[in-house]
Amino acid sequence: MTTTQTCTVAEYLAIRLEQLGITHLFGVPGNHLGPFLSTLHEKTKVRWVGTPTEGGAGQAADGYARVKVADAEIALGEQGIGAVAVTYGVGAFNLLNAIGGAFTEYVPLIAINAAPTYEQWLNQRAIGLLTSHMSQRPESNLDVYRQVTVDAQALSNPGLAPGQIDAALTACLSHRRPVYLEVMEDVWEARCPAPRGRLTRRERPLTPQSERMLEAAVAACVKLVRDHDNNPILWAGEEIDRFNLAAEFERLVRDTGIPFCTTVGAKSVVSEDIRGFSGVYNGKASHPDVAKVFHNAGCRIGLGSWATSKNLGGKRSIGADWAVAAHEGVHVGASYFPDVRLDRFIPALRKALLTDFGPGAFAADYFADAHKAGLDVPDSTAAYLTSLTGGPYPENVTYDSFFRHLSAFLETQATGGPGARSTPFTVISDAAFALIGSMNLRMPERASYVAQNSWLSIGYSVGAATGVALGRDNARKRPMVFVGDGSFQETCQEMSTHVRHGLRPVVFVLDNAGFYGIEQMLVHPCYYKDDVPDSDGADFYNELHPWQYDKLAAVFGSEKHPMYGTAVRKHDDLATLLKRIAEPTDAINQGPVVVRVRLERHDYPKALQYKIDENCPPLAGASSEGTAG
């Protein structure tokens, strides 16, 4: 921290990052970035974490920001922001995908792009002379990043740099989304006024009109409940997590007794041991029992939940028996109430429901109610949740039996603690079959599950594990990653960062015999029917080159920096492995663990059975049963 009236631009930005509570900066270095990294190292405690790829650096920063936002134990002054730094052109465009994902999913990141000098810019404009990584469009980087950030600045004048930096970082805090700073190389060491004070979030001011909108939205929601037999179900969504509203949501559930589900992206936003939790609702891709119970309720109230084609089956309308509060507004049936903030709507709704109906008025077991009504579901919520965990298991692992086994393992790892149980793991799930399979894991601890539910960039989990591990290092939370083989092939080299920095994630690579299973399910689900020959519908472009994933331990690891790899096909082998992972003194826990989980080509998570049922009528005389385990 500087106490003088001036500092360099590099010092200014470094100080601001440290003030925001950022402890790690991820990225790939380059000569344009060098002066800043040297200053960061000399003047602050922010630690540089170099990664093999810019995309992996962005995913690490994303995972870091998510757990920092979610953690209730954030230290005073920390804001839950991630940061990543790269070099102009080739580095920035590699990073773009990760920033696009963070923008879509409301993850606050600072993207720093070190650019050529101002002199080189003038040469390009005057005579067309290009320098390294520069295209014929001088503002190409800035223009592209304006599409996926809430503020994008190019710093060429050191006198203006403090204002530009502060404006961008304040926008990141206020909008909880990425911002972009492009800094020319010769600006880093130029002097400017030193930072003054600290940056804070700037909320949109409340107005008399927004107060009226809030009151009207709450009244409409209460009427919705009353008009639909007084048996609502809540659907907790991503914004509960992003805006740190877990305590408010839990208070609503506790005081009113309303049962609730979550989206996949909001899984474990509160402990799944809380009374009323009724599973993860993911539209048609839900566990069938959850979907039946969710739709059997009188009405549905989404709080911070994002409607996508994945969780609402592509339907734009949420229906007359729905309310959804998200994106700074509230839908109640066909009515819309704009400019209603979620952090004010949840407590106002709780107060109105308590006033109109009384404490605990909605306490119910919707599984028991649905069972009594004749629906084919377990006879209680407890029975349903118990069915997600443990055996009996088949001899060989399947998607569903694998995740039941892992759920039982996480259950045994839970330890007693004040208010809730906890495990030494944070689950990070990739897209596709890994996401569908892992969404029904039992998570007793709040904020113990991380996934990209909307952007769904394959391979995200491996890079994100770096940031999650470092963001939760003080809590000793070890990442547990579930990733498909095709996804892993995109970003497997990020495991070398885990080895290098002594991180210890457990990475389960779901290997279904070298095949993009989710893509096959989307383009030709009939491939998975028992009565379809193997050769029918095996689209050539979904074939993967088979890898021996467990052998990567020998590639990335060494005697000094160990990494362990193994393969499992049978549940007995998986049980033996999990026993070793649970033993802290076992040698395999000295570094990262990569596990090749060998699955059958035609296996798939049971939650996707609807794709087959809707698209593949049974052949004459053939069974309509699926192959899920």
Image (cartoon, grey):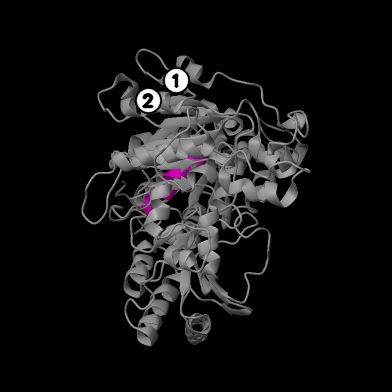
State the image quarter where residue 535 is shown. Answer: top right
Residue picked out by circle 2: 577
- Amino acid type, mark 2: Leu
Residue 51: image x %, image y %? Answer: 49, 30
**Dot 2, how many residues are within 10 Å of its Cα: few (below 14), some (14-19), or many (20+)?**
some
Distance between mark 1 and mark 2 Cα atoms? 9 Å
> In the figure, 358 relative to 519: above or below?
below
> In the figure, 48 relative to 196: above or below?
above
Q: Which mark is residue 136?
A: none
- Amino acid type, mark 1: Thr
Is 289 or 414 nearer to us in this picture?
289
Residue 89: image x %, image y %? Answer: 64, 37
Q: Earlier in the sequence, mark 1 or mark 2?
A: 1
Q: Residue furthest top?
A: 559
The segment highlighted magenta reads: 59-70
Q: Is residue 249 visible?
A: yes
Q: Determine contact: label 1, label 2, CB under 8 Å.
A: yes
Residue 340: image x %, image y %? Answer: 51, 76
State the image quarter where residue 457 is shown. Answer: top right
State the residue at coordinates (42%, 63%): 201
Q: Is residue 24 visible?
A: no
Query: Principal SS element in the magenta part?
Result: helix
Front position among marks 1 and 2: 2
State the residue at coordinates (31%, 38%): 473
Is disc 1 placed on a helix, strand or loop?
strand
Residue picked out by circle 1: 566
Asked if the magenta segment contains residue 66, the reply would be yes
**Dot 1, how many residues are within 10 Å of its Cα: few (below 14), some (14-19), or many (20+)?**
some
> In the figure, 590 relative to 244: above or below?
above
Is 390 or 550 nearer to us in this picture?
390
